[in-house]
Image (cartoon, helix red, strand yellow):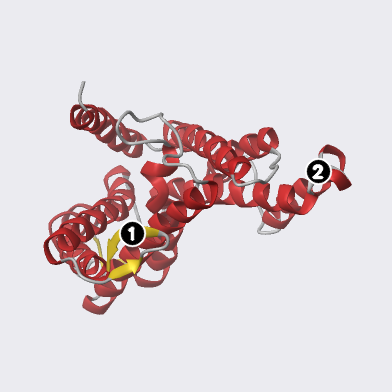
Amino acid sequence: MTELVRRVVVALIGAPLAVWLIWLGDAPLATMAAVLSAIGAWEFFRIAREAGSTPLANLGIVLSALIPIAVHAHYLGVVQIPIIAVPLVVLAIIAATIWMRGVDGRPIGAASSTVLGVLYTGGTLSYVYALRYFNYAVGETAGALVVILPVILTWASDTGAYFTGRIIGGRRLMSSVSPAKTISGAIGALVTTTLVCALFVHYALRPYAQLSFTPWGLALFAVGISVAAQVGDLAESLFKRDARVKDSGTLFPGHGGVLDRLDSLFFVLPVAYALYTWLLIPAPT
């Protein structure tokens, strides 16, 4: 099976499965987020070790998987998670470092890389559940569309950057981190994302979710998502270059690992939640 065929097969299976789980929401969506968070954390800690750090990998993987489950429990009303929970998790990791690494185990690097790995994977992916049950999204269709919009815009941003960069080329955006990315590609990503956002809002979000943006709000949302997607891509490239590894893993044949596939979404999901809170409005009747 060629590389291209593997990519197509994975996409044809993965995309409908992801959309189905987003539509279902509830425990299936939380489970998907937890599994991907755990695998992503495992990949991150492998990269961290290659870069010379000594993370508390087992603890970090468990905590990363538990965050989406905890968010699910919060929305069910089983537990109430206060904002103080985040620093408490950080303090727990630091406390564990005392016993598990000690003075000779490079404790600062161990604690720092563990905290970063947990928040970078489970902390960000848990927002897929928060988006699914966003305040304004009433009903299954609305909740699913609120999640699908930033996911589609992430794809649009990446596609726009790729084709614009290939066609126009020009000056590199940040050659030391990702040599293939160009300034023209970054601009193309912004334009493509804005156009796709306008189409999605007009043909899907307004009629089926009764949600919308003001014209300026739509532009700000699209640009914010594109910028977040591009920064997320660059961030994972930076981590891999620091560790001198090509791919984060091999879970998706032809696509790499969870970090390789979801790098942009790690940034996009929390940014989308923040922008929705600020910009999303009920559609005018």
Number of the label disc, if any, that sits on residue 179: 1
97 to the left or right of 207: right
The residue located at (42%, 41%) in the rendering is: 246
Residue type pointed to by label 1? Pro
Q: Which residue is mark 2?
A: 105
User: In the figure, 27 relative to 202: above or below?
Assistant: above
The residue located at (40%, 29%) in the rendering is: 251
The residue located at (39%, 43%) in the rendering is: 260
User: In the figure, 153 relative to 172: above or below?
Assistant: above
The residue located at (75%, 46%) in the rendering is: 93
CA gap between label 1 and label 2 equals 35 Å
1 or 2: tag closer to the N-terminus: 2
Label 1 Cα neighbours within 10 Å, binned few <14 / some 14-19 / many ≥20: few
Closer to the camera in the image, 247 or 158? 247
Tag 2, which secondary structure? helix
Location of residue 216 in the rendering, given as x and y in whole percent from the top left corner: 25, 79
Label 2 Cα neighbours within 10 Å, binned few <14 / some 14-19 / many ≥20: some
